[in-house]
Image: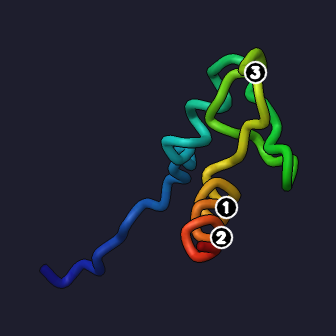
Amino acid sequence: MDEPYCETSEPTPSEPTPGEAEKASGPPYAECVLCREPTEYPDTVKGAPLCPVCAWQEAQRTACSG
């Protein structure tokens, strides 16, 4: 009990967040038409895809413009 507590410091690999893991291993994703960030939609989607942030902001704008 008189011995000092020694903790070995081994570097732990940083684990990607769930969103990063999906985007790293998934198909190519479409760019957001507003901010050009990757969206949750595949590159082959038709229309004007929005990233989650821009989709939320667009929903806020259209909800209040009545």
Which corner quadrant of the image does residue 53 belong to? bottom right
Which corner quadrant of the image does residue 26 belong to? top right
Label 2 CA crowd tier, 10 Å (few <14, some 14–19, many 20+)? few
Q: Residue furthest left?
A: 1
Disc 1 marks a residue whose amino acid type is Glu
Q: Which mark is residue 58?
A: 1
Residue at coordinates 76% horizontally, 15% vertically from top-left?
Answer: 44
Dot in front, 3 or 2: 2
Where is residue 61 drawn, in percent x and y?
Answer: 65, 70
Disc 3 marks a residue whose amino acid type is Lys
Say if mark 2 contacts mark 1, CB within 8 Å.
yes
Q: Residue furthest bottom?
A: 2
Instruction: Look at the picture and state if 30 lies above or below 15.
Output: above
- Which of pointers 1 and 3 lies earlier in the amino acid sequence? 3
Instruction: Look at the picture and state if 44 lies above or below 54.
Output: above
Quadrant of the frame with the C terminus: bottom right
Label 1 CA crowd tier, 10 Å (few <14, some 14–19, many 20+)? few
Q: Nearer the viewer, residue 49 or 42?
A: 49
Instruction: From the image, tell me which residue sits under label 2.
Output: 61
Instruction: From the image, tell me which residue sits under label 3.
Output: 46
Q: CA distance from mark 3 to mark 2?
A: 23 Å
Where is residue 5 drawn, in percent x and y?
Answer: 29, 76
SS at mark 3 in the image: loop
